[in-house]
Amino acid sequence: KIKLEVSNMISLQHNNCSVEFKLSEYVIETRTLFGTSHSSTNSRTNALFCVKINGIESYGEVGLPPKKKGVYFADYSDVEYFFDYYTKEVENVITNFGSLEEEINQYNPFKELPERYFSVTRLSQLTNESKQLEDVVKILFFSLDKSTENYKNELDENNNDNEEEIDKKQMFGALRASYSGFEAAILSYWA
């Protein structure tokens, strides 16, 4: 049995392109109890990310086992937090696109990877695509990297200001889960 409930949604516009983000809690209930070395359960809550650009939807999914210190680091509320964090960054980048356009045009989300990976989807090779659509996809990847960088910096600042030690591993686990979901949805759009 599967339950799907949209918990967060935001719609944005850049030039003539519409972008919509949805985050859904995706609960899977099994008929029988199943166990891992860490827990037993008959349900699992996952996160389903949807990115819709000009009416075309693409998805990314993240499995979220129950949190267990030192093992599983993210739950749905962590993903919701980063969803809000990321979508605010996208909104900020769109709002300030004029001053960021040169940086975004030079941005390459695949720069860390060997040329053989994502060779068809590398933005520099998408010459037949409209400039506006290419800008939107670059904005999404650029914002994902920027929000990740800002999130990490915020963790470092909070960790230095607080006497109470923040469990960075926990927070980075939440970040990785959320990043993966968005990245999968954006890459799926290009597929």
Image (tube, grey):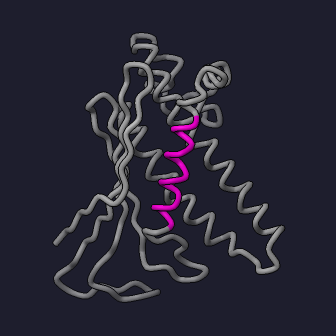
Q: Position of residue 20 (x, y in %)?
A: 35, 39
Q: Quadrant of the C terminus?
A: top left
Residue 102 colored in magenta in the image: no
**Residue 62 placement: quadrant:** bottom left
The residue drawn where x is 38% and y is 34% is 19
Over which residues does the magenta segment extend?
78-92
Main SS, magenta residues: helix
**Relative to 162, is 39 on the left or the right?**
left
Work out whether residue 95 or residue 127 is closer to the camera in this orientation and state it: 95
x and y percentages locating residue 33 in the rendered image:
25, 88
| Left or right of 117 in this view: 65 | left
Residue extending furthest front?
95
The residue at 34%/60% (across/down) is: 7
Query: Is residue 89 within the magenta segment?
Result: yes
**Which quadrant of the structure image shows residue 44?**
bottom left
Which residue shows up at 53% across the image and 30% down it?
A: 94
Q: Front-most of 24 and 106?
A: 24
Residue 179 at what x, y percent from top left?
52, 52
Residue shown at 66% from the left, 22% from the top: 99
| Residue 85 placement, left or right of 134 | right
Quadrant assignment for the N terminus = bottom left
Please name whichever residue, 48 or 15, is drawn nearer the observer in this view of the structure.
15
Relative to 81, does residue 187 appear above or below in the rendering? Answer: above
Q: Which of 3 and 90 lies nearest the eye of the viewer?
A: 90
